[in-house]
Amino acid sequence: MMHSSIIIGTGSRRNASAPSGANRINPSRIPNEFYPTPPEATRALLSVEKFEGSIWEPACGEGAIAKVLADTGHKVVATDLVEYGFGISGIDFLKELRPRAKHIVTNPPYGAGLADAFAEKALRFAAQTGGTVAMLLNLSSLSHRRRTEWWKEKPPARLYAIDDIVCWPSHRYGPAPEYFTKHRYVWAVWTPNHKGPSAFWWLSAAEFRGGQFSHNNNKKRRTS
Ligand SMILES: C[S@@+](CC[C@H](N)C(=O)[O-])C[C@H]1O[C@@H](n2cnc3c(N)ncnc32)[C@H](O)[C@@H]1O
């Protein structure tokens, strides 16, 4: 499948690949926090959310999210700090000065406050573009004493718990360790001007693995 609507853009192509063992948040983490998103997670998101206009995947890795977005007809700008042979490398999202597209959809790096910094930055860009931000986050990040006030100040319009996905680069490191398969994820979706409580709903990954699935079937989403 060609991903012809992925914009390569104008960033530098410096090879920022880390040597094995470098750029780890801690020794048990994969270098550069490279935990790719299985395609069914993005398909599930697209079954309940609509993105009109261009989308920036600012931590694109090998393009796991960006490819699904492009394959479903979205115009995608894909960047990453590190070179994975996909999109534009050498782009530190946290140092970017201007939004590269209307919406932002990503599974950001976690650990050392990175996911928090990504969310803050993405929301600042979305305030400029009037776009939506969708981030795949660790479910436990919703319930954390350092973040409670932040969530209350910046509530996502919608939260989707997604079951049964494993974000692990098994093509590089073999099967995920058992402790890792217990991680649980949530899509947090911020829309312009949303205030008040977040709607919460559930997505089943199995429905979006291979086979048939339909996009933007909003009937399934609870909206209030
Ligand atoms: C959890 S992985 C997810 C990759 C991709 N979004 C996906 O879903 O498959 C996080 C990614 O963030 C990238 N990254 C880490 N720090 C970054 C930064 N400051 N700016 C841009 N990308 C960064 C890593 O190289 C890695 O590809």
Image (tube, helix red, strand yellow):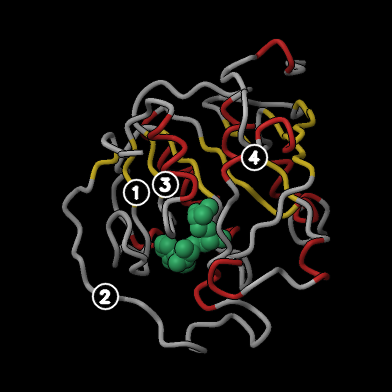
Disc number for residue 194: none
Q: Looking at mark 2, is its residue's CB closer than 8 Å to ligand 1?
A: no
Q: Is residue 220 above or below residue 91?
A: above
Element carrying mark 2: loop
CA gap between label 3 and label 1 equals 5 Å
Few, some or many residues within 10 Å of mark 2 (<14, 14–19, 20+): few
Disc number for residue 57: 3
Q: Is residue 11 above or below residue 81?
A: above
CA gap between label 4 and label 2 equals 36 Å
Dot placed on the residue nearer the N-terminal end, 3 or 1: 3
Q: Looking at mark 4, is its residue's CB closer than 8 Å to ligand 1?
A: no
Dot placed on the residue nearer the N-terminal end, 4 or 3: 3
Residue sitting at 61 percent across and 35 percent down?
210
Image quadrant where residue 11 sits: bottom left
Residue for badge 1 = 78
Disc number for residue 15: 2
Does the rendering let one see residue 118? no
Residue sitting at 61 percent across and 25 percent down?
194
CA gap between label 4 and label 1 equals 25 Å
Q: Give yes or no for contact between labels 4 and 1 (Cβ–Cβ under 8 Å).
A: no
Dot placed on the residue nearer the N-terminal end, 2 or 1: 2
Foreground mark, 2 or 3?
Answer: 2
CA gap between label 2 and label 3 equals 19 Å
